[in-house]
């Protein structure tokens, strides 16, 4: 049976939520693990990435979870390639 466009979009949206949730958890973990312990300590690159991207990822997740259909479609159009890249990154380094 052929999937209709609505089913395909719903599948993408659910997959994107899972991917972004995994990444969001990873970013929160990086903030905890890699936060500087001393004031003169240099920032770890994963800590900096987490600080830069955490709110952004949360914003996209909020739209996909709670937004109206028009906003969700806009997220698909704007961020689908980035979600694919994040999925690749999650596969390459599932715990870091």
Image (cartoon, grey):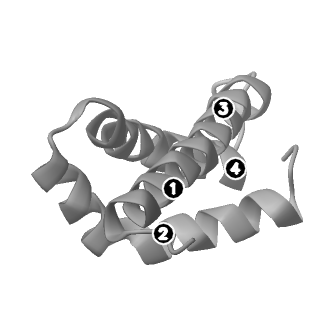
Q: Residue at x 27, y 73 (%)?
A: 77
Q: Can the viewer see residue 48 in this picture? A: no
Mark 4 — residue? Answer: 46
Q: CA distance from mark 3 to mark 1?
A: 21 Å
Mark toward the start of the polypeptide (2 vs 1): 2
Q: Which mark is residue 11?
A: 1
Residue plotted at (45% across, 48% down): 52
- Marks 3 and 4 in Cβ contact (< 8 Å): no
Q: Cβ–Cβ below 8 Å for labels 2 and 1?
A: yes
59 displayed left or right of 71: right
* Mark earlier in primary sequence (3, 1): 1
Sequence-earlier tag: 4 or 1: 1
Q: CA distance from mark 3 to mark 4?
A: 13 Å
Q: Earlier in the sequence, mark 4 or mark 2?
A: 2
Mark closer to the observer (4, 1): 1
Q: Which mark is residue 25?
A: 3
Do tag 2 and tag 3 residues touch (Cβ < 8 Å)? no
Asked whether disc 4 touches disc 1, contact meaning CB atoms under 8 Å apart, the reply is: no
Name the secondary structure under disc 2. loop
* Tag in front: 2 or 3: 2
* Left or right relative to 16: residue 29: right
Instruction: Kindly report which numbered mark, 3 or 4, lies closer to the viewer in this rendering.
Output: 3
Disc 4 packing (10 Å; few <14; some 14–19; many ≥20): some
Query: Do callouts 4 and 2 mark residues in contact (Cβ within 8 Å)?
Result: no
Q: Which residue is mark 2?
A: 3
């Amino acid at each position: 049976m052929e999937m209709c466009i609505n089913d395909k979009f719903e599948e993408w949206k659910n997959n994107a939520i899972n991917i972004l949730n995994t990444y969001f958890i990873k970013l929160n973990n990086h903030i905890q693990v890699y936060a500087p312990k001393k004031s003169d300590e240099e920032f770890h690159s994963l800590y900096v990435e987490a600080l830069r991207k955490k709110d952004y990822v949360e914003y996209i997740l909020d739209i996909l979870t709670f937004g109206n259909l028009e906003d969700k479609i806009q997220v698909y159009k704007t961020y689908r390639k980035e979600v694919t890249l994040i999925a690749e990154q999650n596969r390459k380094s599932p715990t870091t």
